[in-house]
Image: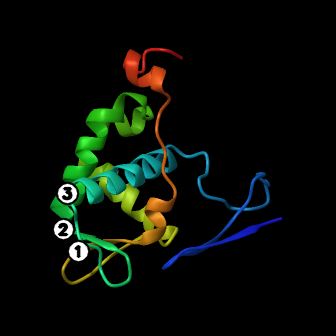
Amino acid sequence: DFQLELYRNTAFLTRTERKARLHLFPDNRAIADIALQFAAYVRKQQQEQDIPLQYDGSLRLMPVDYEKWLEALKKEYGRGWSKQYREALISETARDLLAYLESWKMAAQDEESGVISLRPLLVRLVGDYFADFKQTGGDKA
């Protein structure tokens, strides 16, 4: 029932149908939507700013840059986020997002330096809103 996908520095199993007994990414939590949008943002920033990747394909960020990226993402998409994250401080959303990404092995934070390593798997899965959401500012249901 699974399909194995292999990339240069990432391998994962995908499935076309959801099964209730499995814990899959993305799930139905609001932070999963933010994770998908953040992944697209990371890919865009890496390409536009020509940020070099590490030997293992990861991208390293200082915590302040991670929060800046998340703040920019909130300005662009925040009106579509759940009330919890629309009203939360960036630091709270950043904490929840990092914990979620770490639980899926898409990110890791160095305990000593605080540097956040965004792993290659993160940008393999991206999310965006429909064009009509962007055109109307999210006012349509």
Residue depicted at 50% across the width and 69% down the height: 103
Q: Which residue is drawn at 47% across and 33% down?
A: 129
Front residue of 17 and 7: 7
Does residue 40 appear anywhere in the picture?
Answer: yes
Q: Residues within 10 Å of mark 2 (few under 14, many from 20)?
A: some
Residues at discs 2 and 1 in contact (Cβ within 8 Å): yes
Q: Where does label 1 land, which residue?
A: 115
Q: Is residue 62 left or right of residue 29?
A: left
Residue found at the far left of this picture: 64
Find residue 96 and report its image quarter: bottom left
Of residues 12 and 18, the one drawn nearer to the viewer in this rendering: 12
Q: Name the residue located 31 percent from the left edge and 55 percent from the top edge.
A: 94
Q: Disc 1 residue type?
A: Val
Lower position in the chain sequence, tag 2 or tag 3? 3
Label 3: how many Cα within 10 Å (few below 14, some 14–19, many 20+): few
- Residue 49's tag is 3
* Count of marks, rendered view: 3
- Residue 89 in view, yes or no: no
Mark 2 — residue?
Answer: 62
Looking at the image, tell me whether mark 2 or mark 1 is earlier in sequence order: 2
Q: Earlier in the sequence, mark 3 or mark 1?
A: 3
- Where residue 71 sits in the image (x, y, percent)? 23, 44
Tag in front: 2 or 3: 3
User: Quarter-wise, where is residue 65 in the image?
Assistant: bottom left
Marks 3 and 1 in Cβ contact (< 8 Å): no
Numbered disc 1: secondary structure: loop
Please state the horizontal and vertical placement of residue 47, each as a whole percent of the image: 29, 57
Taking 19 as reference, is 27 left or right?
left
| Mark 2 residue element | loop
